[in-house]
Structures are given as structure tokens and as C-alpha cells.
Image (cartoon, rainbow, N blue to C red):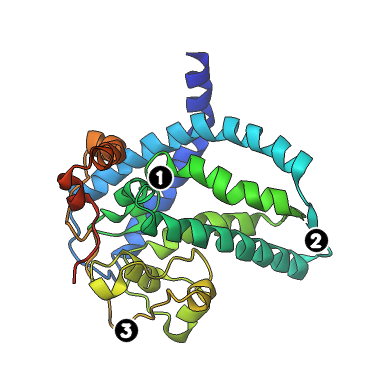
Amino acid sequence: MSLLTETLAATLVPLKTVAVILAVGLLIERLRPAERHQPWRDIGFNLAYVTFIIILNGLLIPPLMALMQPIARDYGLHVPIAFPDGVGWQVVQALVFFAIFDFFYYWLHRAQHTLPWLWPLHKLHHSERSVNVTTTMRHHWLEEPIRVWVVLLPIGLLFDQKPVTLAWISTAITLWGYFVHANLRLPLGPLSMLVAGPQWHRIHHSIEPQHTDRNFAAFFPIYDKLFGTYVHPGRDEYPATGLHSREDLNGPMRAVFSPFRDWWRALRGDRASDATDDRPTD
């Protein structure tokens, strides 16, 4: 019980921070929404789920990071990446870290869409029919532990990166995910080829067949350009979002246990599992 009490105390600050971000984000979205009249019941479910995920991550991630760090320390190549002090060089340091992180994130994200045993975990995030700022942390609770081993561990094994000391840069990392999921009519035009934005990322969530498995990067669409998964949004293109099957996972039990159900159906060879594939058909 003491572990739970400590976790709740430790997550109080993140909970308050996320609450402020979401409140501000929802207000900003009302200025120029990409999709009007999104159901408040969907937003309410996301808010409850975010609370659950923050507390659970507080329990799961610290011990996983404690396990990972000695492995990275003892077996890593430790290729140094360090730039001089100063604001300009700190920005470069951060951009290099973003680029390295995004490379590993891109391939994990792409695998989540193309490998049948990973897709059931990622499906909860894509079942969102009303993409908005509250969608940002709508991920299955097993996804973040997987990222620790598939993204952070390889980075730790390969590189020895000088920490970024400017607080606003770490804040920018935190806010970026909320920005790209925002329900905002905010076209970036040609800049969409350089940095991810809400319209560009909405294409990733689109139910349109031509958008399936496109725009995987978190920060830099250059990876999608390099590896053939880039789609540039049209001038006024804001497609509907969700699963191709239109499956509804807005429920506590469905959100938490749907991957296990899908895996069990697949192991049994149950034809009903075809309905959980959520790929468009020709």
C-alpha cells in the first residue's frame, strides 16, 4: 500500500500539469476547430483514461528505467554527442536528440501498424473518432513500457548525449504531442514537410484508405519522406478519424483488455478476429 501511496503522491504534479494543458488546449481548439461539435462523452472518457494511465505509468516506468540504465551503461557504445554550452548550441543539442529519438520512434510506430501482434496494442489510440488534445495520452498501458525497451534502450546503448539544460526545450517536447493531436484548423503548408503539425498528423488518424499507414514520425516528416510513408495534406483536408471497422473502445474494460481479446482470437484462429484487423479492403 505504501508503494501506491508514494506513486499517487509522485503523480500529483503530472496530473495537475496535464489537467492545465488539456484545459488550455480544449479552449484553444474552440477558436478554429478542424471538427466541430465533438461529443463531450468521448472527451470525458479520455480525461478519465488519462488519469488512469498517468498513475499506472508512475508505477511501471520508474522500475523499468532502473533496469534499463545499467544495461545502457555497461554495454553501450557510448558514441558522444555533445555541443558547447550556450543557448544556440543547446537548441542544436535538443534537435539532434529529437532527430535520434524520432528515428527509433518512427520504426516502432510503423511496426505497430504493420505487425499483427503489435497492432492490437496501438488500436486504442486509433479508435478515437474525435481526435483532439485529450487523445494525446490515449494509449494502451503497455505501450509506454514497450517504448522504454524499443526506443530509449537502443538510444542509450548507442549514444552518450549531453543533457539539455534549457527548461523550455523539455517543455516543448512535452507539449508537442498535445499540439499535433489538437483539433485545430491549422495548415502549415510547405512546412508540413519539415515539422509535424495537427493537420499532417490528422492524416495519420484518417479513416480514408489512401491515408492508411502514413505519416508515422513524431517530429520530423523527413523520415516519412525517406521511407515512403509521407502524405502531404491537401489545403482544406481534415478527414474523419477512427478505425476502419468503426469499433468503439470507449469503455474501461474494452480499453484495458481489448488487445488480450484480439490476441486470444488470433491464437484460436477465430475468424471473428478478422474484424479487429481494421485495415481497409480493396
Residue 31: image x %, image y %? 30, 69
Does residue 89 appear left or right of residue 20 in this picture?
right
Does residue 173 appear left or right of residue 164 in this picture?
left
- For the point 47% across and 26% down, the residue is 8
Q: Secondary structure at mark 1?
A: helix
Residue beneath disc 1: 19
> In front of the other: label 3 or label 1?
3
Residue 7: image x %, image y %? 51, 26
Residue 145: image x %, image y %? 50, 40
Q: CA distance from mark 3 to mark 1?
A: 33 Å
* Whether label 3 touches label 1, CB < 8 Å: no
Residue type at the position of mark 1? Ala
Residue type at the position of mark 2? Ala
Q: Secondary structure at mark 3?
A: loop
Residue type at the position of mark 3? Gly
Q: CA distance from mark 2 to mark 3?
A: 39 Å
Residue beneath disc 3: 234
Residue beneath disc 2: 82
Question: Which residue is nearer to you in this view: 56 or 182?
Answer: 56
Q: Secondary structure at mark 2?
A: loop
